[in-house]
Amino acid sequence: METIKKGSFTIEADQGQAVIMIKSRVFGLLDQAISFRALCEELRTKGHKFIAVDLSEAESINQEGIGALLVQLKKTKEVGGKLVLCSCSVGVHKKITETKLQEVFSCFDSQEEALASFTTEGTPS
């Protein structure tokens, strides 16, 4: 498993799967959203098309963060992959529920559950 730190993100990637851990109180500051988009693109280019976003350390998420997640969900699906959320903090979970995005995103209680969801859909490549 490869672990990389980039700005407010820590990434663990292995065998077509990646976990992006958001390491800031608010997810969605403009420069952070731009960096998130670039990071997801880089991961997909390297063959990691099954991505879990760990939001346990983000106390809240704003519209930029939600927009970045939605765009990357679409782009990941376009390459036959999957992007899921996991370990959402109370504040993030509240925002996801308020905006009814739980109907769009698969949300899991832990990284382990999120990663297990990838193998139930076939072996990640």
Image: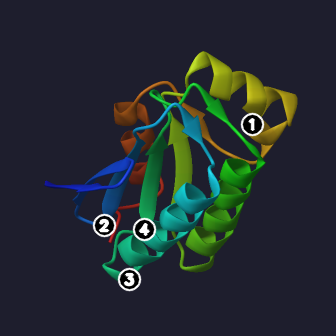
Q: Are marks 1 and 4 in contact (CB under 8 Å)?
A: no
**Pointer 3 with pointer 2, Cβ within 8 A:** no
- Going from N to C along the chain, the mark reached first, 3 or 1, is 3
**Spatial CA span between label 3 and label 2:** 10 Å
Marker disc for residue 102: 1
Precedes in sequence: disc 1 or disc 4: 4
Q: Amino acid at mark 2?
A: Gly
From the viewer's perspective, is the residue at label 4 or at label 2 nearer? Answer: 4
Foreground of the two, 55 or 108? 55
Q: Amino acid at mark 1?
A: Gln
Secondary structure beneath label 4: helix
The residue that label 4 is drawn on is 39
In the rendered structure, which amino acid carries the disc numbered 4? Leu
- Measured as percent of width and height from the top left, residue 45 is found at 38, 82
**Which circle marks residue 70 in the picture?**
none
Disc on res. 16: 2
Residue 104 to residue 58: above or below? below
Q: Residue at x 49, y 24 (%)?
A: 109
Q: Which residue is mark 3?
A: 45
Q: Residue at x 68, y 46 (%)?
A: 105
